[in-house]
Amino acid sequence: MENYIGKKLKELRAKSGITQKELAKHLGCTEIMISRYELGVSQISIQQLEKIAKVFKTQIAAFFDGSTIGASVPHSFKNAFVFDLDDTLVDGRLFCGETIARVITNVNPSVNFDAVVQLHESIRGMTIEDLYIHILTELGIKADVKQLLKHDHSIQEENIDKMKLFDGVVDILEFLKRNNKKLYVCTNRSKDLMTKVFEASQILPYFDEVISCVDSGYKKPNPYCLIDLIKRSGMPANEFIYFGDSEIDSQFAQNAEIDHIIFDQYLNNKNLFKKLVNMFLENQINGEK
């Protein structure tokens, strides 16, 4: 991540015709530090990135192209942090893809296992039912989706320990709790399997509430569950921020009219939470702009 941001900084500086010395003067640091930033040796803080963005008349998001899918710029003090679960807090992409491939190839052995996994890799944010419908349609296969879902459910139950937390998740949750923040999960995963994931990872005590949009009958991007959560919390909507991994998550937060950050863990060696989100969270918790 530091290398990527450093290269982006160097690219913007060269395009603007600003020397390292001139940029250092704007930032109140040394020319050597600018060189370290561009080489990826030193990490650039959010505060410095904000100053750099002003110098180049751009947005902070410009430094994360290819690392984040999208984001709304958080604009107020945050007291409530809402997270998606799969591929945001928990690394389950390969496991879920292989589970779907096992289920479908069990029904139709002529289907290529790896082709199913690859199809799953190209999809983000769908419910498990919609995933099956989409993949079956793409493959031109007819099957009883309800029976497939039952088989999928049993496989996931037996192998739930394969759903591992991403690096840095516990540190983030600990940090937020120490700062008396409200933490929630709002996901399309069913409550029973979600509970088993929490039991396996032992992170349930961090959360004030976990919500299954599917079980509530309002799957994302329908904002009902998020709007209902905000109303019940008694806090203003501008104190909420949502973290997810897909365009559907982005639409979900936008439909509820709250700030959001959307990112792809798999483009960032699965440690984006530790390196990127931690910077955003610390900035927002301290109420800095």
Image (spheres, rainbow, N blue to C red):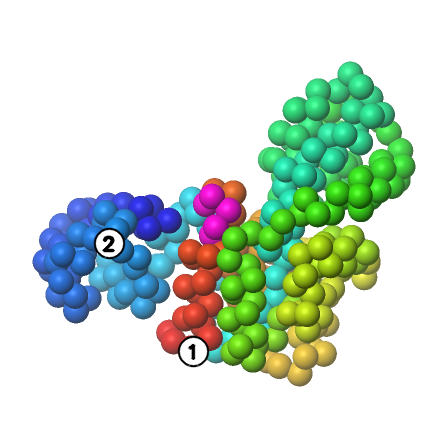
Q: Residues within 10 Å of mark 1 (few under 14, many from 20)?
A: few
The magenta segment: 268-272
Instruction: Establish if 147 lies above or below 43.
Output: above
Assess whether residue 138 is covered by the magenta stretch.
no
CB within 8 Å, label 2 to label 1: no
Identify the residue at the far top of this view.
110
Residue 97 visible within the image: yes
> With 211 as the anchor, is 171 left or right in this view?
left
* Mark nearer the N terminus (2 vs 1): 2
Assess whether residue 269 is covered by the magenta stretch.
yes
In percent of width and height, residue 35 lies at 17, 52
Image point 76% across, 30% down: which residue? 102
Image point 73% across, 30% down: which residue? 101
Image point 51% across, 71% down: which residue? 175
What residue would you read off at disc 1?
A: 287
Residue 37 - label = 2
Q: Decide whether the magenta segment is chiefly helix, strand or loop.
A: loop
Depth-wise, is mark 2 or mark 1 nearer the camera?
Answer: 2
In percent of width and height, residue 159 lies at 75, 43
